[in-house]
Amino acid sequence: MTHSANVYIHPAALVETDAIGPGSRVWAHAHIMSGVTIGPDCNICDSVFIESGVTLGRGVTVKPHVAMGEGLTVEDGVFIGPHVVFTNDLRPRSPRLPLTHARYAKKSQWLLPTRVRHGATLGAGVVVSCGITIGEWSFAAAGAVLLQDVPPFALMLGNPARPVGYACACGATLNMNEGKATCPDCPRTYTLIDRRLTPDHPITLWEETP
């Protein structure tokens, strides 16, 4: 494998892809298969498994013991906590069983893609069912089991996960009052329009201050 000089790969990592952006780091015992694309400035921690066909954007943090199945797209600036699991098949059986050969002969018959939109957070131990979209800047609390699409900025809790509020781009829980939301930790404000939370001013992923 050939990687740019400013990509760090721990000697104990198994990396089978060349498609790793500058500034990214891969730590011990991570296994990244061929066909994976990793953007710049990502941090892939110890014992992470990333299967062929996964794409990570810029500035993604993946904490230890995360399992990422084929068909997953993670956009820029996403945080994935330890022991998060992404599935890609709603009815999994061993493909080595004769009675499953026909189903697994074509990926279109079983593979359901999942997308994590920019800025989202998945806390420790979150389980992500396949075929869903996790909205931008949403926040899934530790142990949440995500079975359906997650709205932007939604704060998700439980098994199955349900929305219990909204999170600011900075990560704080928003204060809601008659369709308006304010952040206790930063100056950002939001408006609830047609049951969708919208920032009153554009949010740029790489801004230093609101």
Image: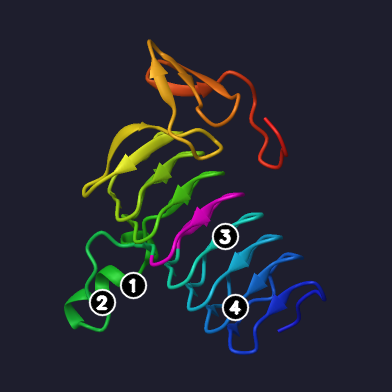
- CA–CA distance between discs 2 and 4? 36 Å
Q: Are marks 1 and 4 in contact (CB under 8 Å)?
A: no
Cα separation, mark 3 vs mark 1, equals 34 Å
Q: Is residue 180 above or below residue 37?
A: above
User: Looking at the image, which is closer to me, 12 or 53?
Assistant: 12
Q: Magenta stretch: give its range.
A: 71-83
User: In the image shown, does 93 or 86 lie closer to the viewer?
Assistant: 86
> Mark 1 or mark 4, which has the lower sequence index?
4
Callout 3 secondary element: strand
Q: Give the number of the disc on residue 180.
A: none
Q: Residues within 10 Å of mark 1 (few under 14, many from 20)?
A: few
Query: Which residue is labeled 4 in the image?
Result: 27
**Disc nearer the start of the sequence (2/4):** 4
Q: Residue at x 39, y 62 (%)?
A: 84
Name the kind of residue labelled 3 in the image.
Answer: Thr
Q: CA gap, disc 1 to disc 4?
A: 34 Å
Rendered view: 153 above or below 11: above
**Cα–Cα span, label 1 and label 2:** 6 Å
Question: x%, y% of residue 77?
Answer: 60, 49
Q: Nearer the viewer, residue 111 or 196?
A: 196
Find disc 3 in the rendering and name its residue. 61
Q: Amino acid at mark 2?
A: His
